[in-house]
């Protein structure tokens, strides 16, 4: 097991982190021996968080680590494309339904870390395919100035997003590339009692209000910040982080009917070149100290380790109405739902 993170040691600056952590490195076929000491991470968190995590892991364990920043859909596609000669050892960050889909396709190797015992059962796969390292809750990122100009109140329900006054003023990503957007789509499935047709019918009604389907789940927060839209459907922590960049017109609201959430995972890639290093990375990622790095780089997801300190900017999950989000079920139906969304909704005229 990797040595615990020394909490008194300051997190390296992003500039220093980027020296140690490569955001575009891939492994050449047949390079197993040359890369045996290095851990390569497919990272679904923000660029800054990925850099800080890999940098501190290296400083604490002495194991070199590199990352490639990828959205959930991109990570799944890259891991699948490289199954014969994996370019990654670890997948870290992004909603667990993507991990469930990868497991169904035989892309992940079960690994039950000794540190997984401290993680609540609802935040991990019982077979050890993935373990949760953070929780993010879905919400609305509202530009109060834009909404005031349109005389529309900040939405507090999914139905509120359908207001005709919000035509082309809602931002959401495409679920084929974005775990955030798939969380929103699966949330509709849950709210409609498991009925795919009804969930897609809701998304079809929302379609005229969507300005565009972005590639990244966090992009709608930036769109809202720039005043391009009135509301972005994002994980709430992305809106909080964007507001901290000086966009004081932003505020977060949550849908009263219930909202979905992501359990950000960490997993061992099947066929990894550096299995031992990957396991040490996973062990380390589950420690309280590792999970406290996020807020230092404006990532305010809730930690899954009960001993980790929570930022006061993290959403209070106990105060919100959360849907019963089954990551395994969501992952099993992801391919079909995404295919239908693309064919029936994203390509439809507005």
Image (cartoon, rainbow, N blue to C red):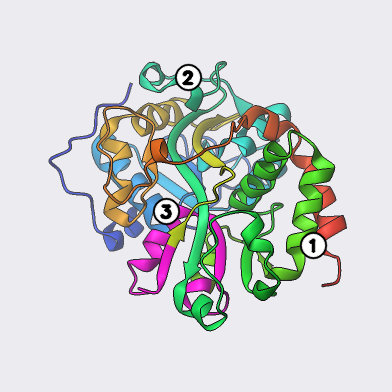
How far apart are the two marked residues, 2 and 3, measured between alpha carbons? Answer: 23 Å
How far apart are the two marked residues, 2 and 1, measured between alpha carbons? Answer: 36 Å
Q: In the figure, is residue 292 to the left or right of 251?
A: left
| Residue that mark 2 sits on | 121
Q: Quadrant of residue 5?
A: top left
Nearest to N terminus: mark 2 or mark 1: 2
Q: Is residue 156 above or below residue 134?
A: below
In the rendered image, the quadrant that contains the C terminus is bottom right
Residue at the spot 42% in from the left edge and 21% down from the top edge: 120
- Is 249 one of the magenta-colored residues? yes
- Is 243 one of the magenta-colored residues? yes
User: Residue 81 or 124: which is nearer the viewer?
Assistant: 124
Nearest to N terminus: mark 2 or mark 3: 2
Q: In the figure, is residue 45 to the left or right of 243?
A: right
* Residues packed near mark 2 inside 10 Å, few (<14), some (14 to 19) or many (20 plus): few
| Residue that mark 1 sits on | 346
The picture places residue 30, in percent across and down from the top left corner, at: 61, 40
| Residue that mark 3 sits on | 237
The picture places residue 316, in percent across and down from the top left corner, at: 37, 42
Q: Which mark is residue 253?
A: none
* Residues packed near mark 3 inside 10 Å, few (<14), some (14 to 19) or many (20 plus): many
Residue at the spot 52% in from the left edge and 83% down from the top edge: 149
> Secondary structure under badge 2?
helix
The region drawn magenta spans: 224-251
> Secondary structure under badge 3?
helix
Residue at the spot 52% in from the left edge and 69% down from the top edge: 153
Q: Is residue 151 above or below residue 264?
A: below
In the rendered image, the quadrant that contains the N terminus is top left
Q: Quadrant of residue 14?
A: bottom left
> Secondary structure under badge 1?
helix
Residue at the spot 65% in from the left edge and 37% down from the top edge: 85
């Amino acid at each position: 097991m990797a040595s615990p993170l020394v909490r008194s040691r300051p997190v390296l600056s992003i500039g220093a982190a980027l020296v140690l952590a490569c955001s575009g490195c891939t492994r050449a076929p047949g390079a197993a021996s040359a890369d045996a000491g290095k851990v390569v991470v497919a990272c679904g968190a923000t660029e800054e968080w990925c850099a800080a995590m890999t940098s501190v892991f290296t400083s604490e364990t002495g194991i070199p680590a590199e990352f490639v920043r990828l959205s959930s859909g991109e990570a799944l596609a890259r891991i699948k494309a490289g199954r014969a000669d994996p370019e990654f050892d670890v997948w870290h960050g992004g909603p667990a339904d993507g991990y469930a889909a990868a497991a169904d396709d035989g892309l992940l190797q079960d690994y039950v870390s000794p540190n997984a015992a401290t993680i609540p059962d609802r935040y991990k796969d019982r077979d050890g395919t993935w373990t949760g390292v953070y929780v993010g809750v879905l919400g609305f990122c509202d530009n109060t100035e834009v909404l005031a100009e349109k005389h529309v109140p900040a939405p507090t329900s999914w139905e509120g997003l359908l207001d005709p006054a919000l035509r082309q003023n809602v931002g959401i990503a495409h679920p084929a590339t974005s775990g955030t957007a798939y969380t929103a789509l699966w949330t509709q499935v849950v709210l409609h009692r498991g009925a795919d047709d009804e969930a897609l019918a809701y998304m079809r009604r929302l379609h005229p209000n969507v300005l565009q389907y972005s590639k990244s789940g966090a992009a709608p927060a930036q769109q809202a910040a720039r005043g391009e839209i009135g509301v972005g459907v994002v994980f709430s922590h992305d809106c909080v982080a964007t507001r901290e960049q000086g966009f004081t017109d932003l505020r977060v609201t949550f849908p009263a009917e219930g909202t979905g959430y992501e359990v950000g995972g960490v997993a061992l890639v099947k066929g990894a070149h550096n299995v031992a290093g990957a396991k040490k990375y996973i062990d380390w990622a589950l420690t309280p100290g590792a999970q406290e790095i996020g807020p230092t780089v404006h990532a305010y997801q809730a930690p899954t380790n009960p001993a980790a300190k929570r930022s006061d900017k993290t959403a209070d999950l106990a105060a919100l109405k959360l849907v019963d989000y089954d990551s395994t079920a969501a992952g099993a139906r992801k391919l079909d739902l995404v295919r239908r969304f693309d064919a029936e909704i994203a390509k439809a005229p507005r």
